[in-house]
Amino acid sequence: MSYLSTLSLATILLSVSCIITIEKYEYVDAAAAQAGAFITPTYKSYAEIEAARHYPGLKSSSPPSSSSSSLMSLMSPLSNILHLKLESPLQLEAMAFPSPSADKTLSSSSSLSTSPVVNDQNAWIKNLNYEEFAKDVSDLGKKLLKETTNDDVDHLNKILSWRDMACIIGISTMWITPNPITIIALSTWTYSSWTMVAHHTCHGGYNRVDAGKFNSRGFALGSIPRRIADWCDWMLPEAWNVEHNRLHHYHLGEKLDPDLVERNLSFLREMNVPLPFKYVVTALFMPIWKWFYYAPNTYKELQLVKMKSEKKDIPKDFNPEEAATLKSLFFPTTESEMAMNEVIQPFTFLKTVLAPFFLTRFVLLPAPLLFIPNIGGVLFFNAILNLVLADLFTNVHGFVTIVTNHAGNDLYKFDDEVKPKSGSFYVRQVVSSVNYATGTDIIDFSHGWLNYQIEHHVWPDLSMLAYQKGAPQLKAICAKHGVPYVQENVLERLRKTVDIMVGRTSMIEFPTELEPVKDKALTGVKWKSSHGSIDDDDE
């Protein structure tokens, strides 16, 4: 057992450590820069991006020395989080070209809306050929779909084996006094079951091959036993399919996007308290966000769909854009929160959504330990502690890699809807999403495959292996057409997301009047199904 534990610890810690992998400095291609593109390397500041775009010939005279590069790479994450300045060649170069727009953002109020202005920052939009961009992106997507084979199934099975290894290690050691091996293993089991297995399955990433039960038509749906067997988490799978697959993916960065961080955290952004207090609130939110906010908010969207399909009246004071939380359900203080209780019956929510996961994970799973004579109670208590700590840890892991995908002062938000698979749709998916470090299964596993968020939003129904293949090609297409493609270390994205949450910065308002009129979804976006691709039927 000691050998297995040691091997497990080394494997899991290596996987987790990839989250904080510091990507090497990239030089901006002069041709791409002159075309108006900026492909964001790790720790490139906003000012640096602007400098590279307006001064394409500007580069460091030579790459930093290996010793100074190592030192700076170790210190950069901490300095970014704490907003410190390091006297490195990279940052000195960035400091030479301060960004007026960034300064303006820092000094502005936390208001959600800003006037769309066509300036140097978004001049690329005026020069973009939407039709040619759409053709290139669509052709690549079709190519990747055709290339889906049993190799994709084999790759899925590989990821499943890693997930199952974490599960076995976690469950077989949960009776031990709380320890990092057990906690990380249990956390990885939960995290990978959602972000990699359920996520890509529910999107239909394996619908075109024989992957057994990993097909969007039925996976985790229809009954509690099926939910427990396939994917049991705090969220109800049917609710998540509606909220995520429909609304988030096809209204990204819009008012109808239920995951728009800037709007959902408006109460904190506008709170008249010292900034450090807001950071504390954000830190306290990370370990509980899935069951406190995400589970009720996804369920709210499902209930709204049901009410509309049954032609029931929406409560008068109900605000559909307001996020549902456990606080608003059980301790409503405003008329809109009270109306929320008419849409979401609080105790029905507890029974239907939260109870199955709570009972199976925190009661039934460790219960057999109680039957061990003399020490059963102690072992059961240790298991509960390990399971609770693992849940807090996986929530933080999920927050860092999920919530940060679409927030930052270098990403765009929009004031209207566009048609799926149009040129404007593809552009929006790219410029309102961000990638992290990519390239190997270990790095991608540690990020939950959420490090391919740009590709995933452009083509939601691909397999994990297809995203690895498609990312470099889509990045090249964006450079060719001058469309911003943001890729940074996940900790830098965490800093930028938290700054949005506390109101320190704001997202960029996209000048939607510059988009082709034919791309506008004047009658809204329609779906045939809440799972799989937008074109898939329910059956």
Image (cartoon, rainbow, N blue to C red):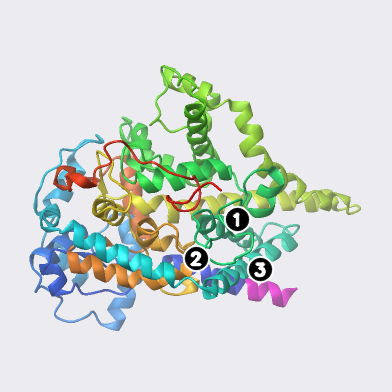
Residue marked by disc 3: 165
Who comes first in sequence, dot 1 or dot 2? 1
Q: CA distance from mark 2 to mark 3?
A: 14 Å
Task: Indicate the amino acid at tag 1.
Answer: Thr
Residue marked by disc 1: 190
**Where in the figure is residue 367, as x and y percent of width and height?**
80, 48
Q: Is residue 439 above or below residue 408?
A: below
Q: Residues within 10 Å of mark 3 (few under 14, many from 20)?
A: some
Q: Is residue 112 above or below residue 202?
A: above
Q: Residues within 10 Å of mark 2 (few under 14, many from 20)?
A: many
Work out whether residue 135 can be spotted: yes
**Looking at the rendering, which quadrant does residue 158 occupy?**
bottom right
Judged by its main secondary structure, the magenta piece is helix
Label 2 residue SS: helix
Say which mark, if any, is on residue 446. Answer: 2
Task: Indicate the amino acid at tag 3.
Answer: Met
Between 73 and 114, the one nearer to me in the picture:
114
What is the span of residues highlighted in magenta in the rendered image?
1-8
Say which mark, if any, is on residue 69. Answer: none
